Image (cartoon, rainbow, N blue to C red):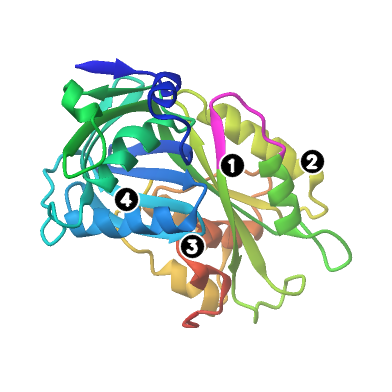
Amino acid sequence: MISLTPDEVRARFGPLFSMKYLVMVDQKSGLAEIREHCRARGTIEWDAANRVRAGGAIQSCHVEGTTMTMLARLGASPAKFGAAGREIGGQALEGVEVDGDKVVTTWSGIAGAGVGVAACLPQAPGVIRAEYPSEDDLRIGGARVCRVRIVSPLYEKVTIGIDDTDTREEGATWVLALKCAEACTLEGVEYLDMRLVQLNPAVPKKTTNCVGSALNFAVRPGRVDALLEYVRDFVESQAVSDDAGIAVYRGIAFAEESPYAKRVKTELLTVDEAEAEAARMGVRFIDSNARKGRIGALGAVLWGNKGVEAAGLYGETF
């Protein structure tokens, strides 16, 4: 086994193109979410296509700009390159395992795809070290197969929904939520992304658009309470409404789809209904108000990791 740090990989192969690498694990659902950021859209799209084709541990994959998000199963899942054999190359995720406060992902690649997993990805900020089975796995390019184990810090995923921080006269929930996320400098917390979630525009007690906000974070072990305290204090100190609601879900995926996801975009709901559904789905509220903002905050959590349809009216396609 040959172990190299990102700096050592960079010294050996020269600087390449991976900009970030981060792995979140949800052990209760047996899933991991892998985020990769590259300097070029073409390479990230090519990697995504090849990994999906090869199978292995990958369950789903989508690309937004130059960022890829993979959903993967925990454990070992040997890949089959199938049509992508030695003639055209291929790339695969073969396993994800938790090792204490670290995550180990196992990769294989053929030809140019081998350069991606053996030389490019191990250089990414967020990687602790890369482990190569033998010197042959460091002979990248050509028709050779390369394998590598990438060790990175263990994170969990936390989704936070926020609603009703504003009034008709002042404020905007999405602005407050985004300021909250971008101002977060807590050690062990990585801000991932934010979504605006269109709720039911027919709700009578609203500002104008009736939109909640969802924030996604990757959080190191033992740092979740600090994040939630920070978000609650920031939101409640900056809100201009006494109705602000804050909902939290710790995990990558829900065990089931909630009917509330549709209802919050199409019906008039009560705080009691929101609280009951939150308890059923494993979502908790951390706001001090216990008022109507909880309805939209739960809706934002339920839609916070879906696609662009979160921003639309229910049933709209884009």
- Give above or below for 106 relative to 101: below
Which of the two discs, 2 and 1, labels the residue nearer the N terminus?
2
Mark sitting on residue 71: 4
Mark 2 is surrounded, within 10 Å at the Cα level, by few (under 14), some (14 to 19) or many (20 or more) other residues, namely few
What amino acid type is highlighted by mark number 1? Ile
Q: Which residue is pictured at 24% across the width and 50% down the height?
A: 58
Residue 78 at least partly seen: yes
Which of the two discs, 2 and 4, labels the residue nearer the N terminus?
4
What amino acid type is highlighted by mark number 3? Trp
- Residue 175 vs residue 272: left or right? right
Mark sitting on residue 286: 1
Q: Which residue is pictured at 10% across the width and 51% down the height?
A: 80
Check if mark 2's residue and mark 1's residue have beta carbons within 8 Å. Answer: no
Q: Which residue is mark 3?
A: 303
Q: Nearer the viewer, mark 2 or mark 4?
A: 4
> What stretch of residues is rendered in magenta?
183-191
Q: Distance from label 3 to label 1 (Cα)?
A: 18 Å
Depth order, front residue of 293/133 = 133
Element under label 3?
Answer: helix
Depth order, front residue of 225/142 = 142
